[in-house]
Amino acid sequence: GVTSMDDFLKKFFPTVYKRTKAKGGGNDSNYCQYDNQGLQLFTSSLYLAGLTATFFASYTTRKLGRKLTMLMASIFFLIGVVLNAAAQEIVMLIIGRILLGCGVGFANQ
């Protein structure tokens, strides 16, 4: 949802925003308007980090227990949310999403 919000696109992905607002020849299709590697990295970083973190979380759960693993997930979530809320550039957004993905992976375990 956030990747289609105008304010978000203006700030972090201005080329994508320009492409979505330039309706050449009356073409209302969204096909290839969101084609941007940075936007794709932003979207997929959470899922990839969640998948990877699940493998580490299984080891952590075995060695430290369920409660400490959930505490670690909470810390990942907290840091990720702070980074995403305070993001001024795309790098902060992606790092925040990776940490949120780690929180998802640890919480799933």
Image (tube, rainbow, N blue to C red):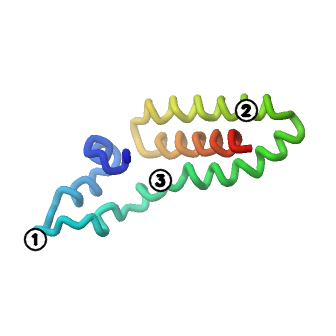
Position of residue 25 in the picture relative to residue 105 (left or right):
left
Q: Amino acid at mark 2?
A: Met
Distance from the alpha carbon under mark 3 to that under mark 1: 29 Å
Residue located 53% across and 39% down the image: 96
Q: Which residue is mark 3?
A: 43
- Residue 70 circle label: 2
Residue located 48% across and 56% down the image: 41
Residue located 42% across and 61% down the image: 37
Q: Amino acid at mark 1?
A: Gly
- Residue 60 circle label: none
Residue located 89% across and 38% down the image: 63
Q: Amino acid at mark 3?
A: Thr
Distance from the alpha carbon under mark 2 to that under mark 3: 24 Å
On the image, the x and y values in percent for residue 13 come to 33, 51
Quadrant housing residue 79 = top right
- Foreground mark, 2 or 3, reads 2
Q: Earlier in the sequence, mark 1 or mark 2?
A: 1
For residue 34, above or below residue 96: below
Distance from the alpha carbon under mark 1 to that under mark 2: 53 Å
On the image, the x and y values in percent for residue 25 come to 10, 71
Verify CB contact (< 8 Å) between mark 3 and mark 1. no
Position of residue 58 in the picture relative to residue 28 (left or right):
right
Crowd rating for badge 3 (residues with CA inside 10 Å; few <14, some 14–19, many 20+): some
On the image, the x and y values in percent for residue 81 come to 52, 32
Crowd rating for badge 1 (residues with CA inside 10 Å; few <14, some 14–19, many 20+): few
Picture quarter with the C terminus: top right
Q: Which residue is mark 1?
A: 25
Position of residue 45 in the picture relative to residue 4 (left or right):
right
- Foreground mark, 1 or 2, reads 2
Crowd rating for badge 2 (residues with CA inside 10 Å; few <14, some 14–19, many 20+): some
